[in-house]
Amino acid sequence: MRFWTIGAALAAALFGAAFAAGYTHGPAAPDSAFDDANRDRPLAALGSEQQCARYSGLPANWRDDPKAGMVHLRGGTFVFGSTRGYQDERPAGDGRTRVGGFWIDQTDVTVAQFAAFVQATGYVTEAEQQGGAAVFHVPTRDELNARDLAWWSWVKGASWRHPRGPGSDVEGRGNLPVTLVTQRDALAYARWLGRDLPTEAEWEYAGKAGRDDASLDAAPRDARGKPAANYWQGPFPVLDTAEDGHAGLAPVGCYAANGFRLYDMIGNAWQWTKDAYTGPHQSHTNGDTAAVAPAARRHDTPMVIKGGSFLCSRDYCVRYRASSRERQEADLAASHIGFRTILRDPA
């Protein structure tokens, strides 16, 4: 698998900016799971509006390094789940779970990275094959009065290339997380790079970064009281006040990283995992995107998605925690779901 040179060159032409811009060899995070394997690697220097705006969406050494854009985490034991969130987050027993070591993307996979994959392989996503996807929009009063889930629509022609359907595109947006991809699409990208999707436990271990999880009603804010993740600010679904400057998806890495130097583990876009959804499920009013899919569509296996998205707010969803979980049919693309990849240590 050495398609990187062609794919990266195309993505650079599409989205501009230097490959290595915005990288640092910074100090390790304080938690011991972030280990010495990262010491001499170029880590993404993101975490502010200026830095994320300049980022091309392609990690340093993308053409040559099979672990480009990743950090290594030692394996360890953590509490899987939370007693402070919804019922479907409750841990089994004491929740103590061990995961092995792995490499994980610092950011969600970007539009630029996915474009490189598609250019190199000719891959066609499931949304493109199905002829559409579930797309969020701010509904009018009439729409809210007319139907449930008025903020979701099945948009013909919507895909990762055309996020709002025909006439929309991703030109100049290579630093956004790629969305409108299914779990199969995410797995195809991961396998192209010799990687995989994380299990729910692996994802949550990385997302918690050695810290206790947030409580149900605590919106993520920093010490200055500013939003620390991209979530819905204002009354959902009629008004996103964009207090943080972002209405809708934000470029990757606009907010501070967690203790493992991972960006956007909370908010912006839900992230696919490898696991089928099991256990209890507590629905939320953001709604099931399958409800707006064509009636003839065959339902697929519900999979676990993690981390919340730009649609989570204090009055709906309220899933901006590492322990939060939601289910999504494996073959259903939506405008608030992306992914990141991992590479497990040899057994």
Image (cartoon, rainbow, N blue to C red):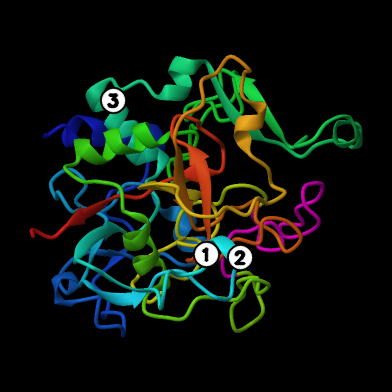
| Cα separation between marks 2 and 1 | 5 Å
Query: Dot 1: few (<14), some (14–19), or many (≥20) neighbours within 10 Å?
Result: many
Callout 1 amino acid: Glu
Q: Main secondary structure of the magenta part?
A: loop
- Give the farthest residue toward the left: 346
Tell me if 48 is positioned left or right of 58 in this view: right
| Cα separation between marks 3 and 2 | 41 Å
Callout 2 amino acid: Tyr
Q: Residue at x 59, y 25 (%)?
A: 168
Tell me if 176 is positioned left or right of 157 in this view: left
Callout 3 amino acid: Gln
Q: Quadrant of residue 103?
A: bottom left
Relative depth, front residue between 160 and 281: 281
Q: Quadrant of residue 116?
A: top left
Q: Which residue is mark 2?
A: 86
Measuring from the top left, give residue 270's x and y in whole percent: 50, 50
Placement of the N terminus among the 4 image quadrants: top left
Query: Dot 2: few (<14), some (14–19), or many (≥20) neighbours within 10 Å?
Result: some
Label 3: which secondary element:
helix
Q: Are marks 3 and 2 in contact (CB under 8 Å)?
A: no
Above or below for 53 versus 136: below
Label 2: which secondary element:
loop
Magenta extent: 228-246
Query: Dot 3: few (<14), some (14–19), or many (≥20) neighbours within 10 Å?
Result: some
Placement of the C terminus among the 4 image quadrants: bottom left
Q: Is residue 53 visible?
A: yes
- Quick one: label 3 or label 2, which is nearer the N terminus? 2
Q: Residue at x 82, y 47 (%)?
A: 238
Q: Are marks 2 and 1 in contact (CB under 8 Å)?
A: yes
Q: Which residue is mark 1?
A: 89
Q: Which residue is mark 3?
A: 119
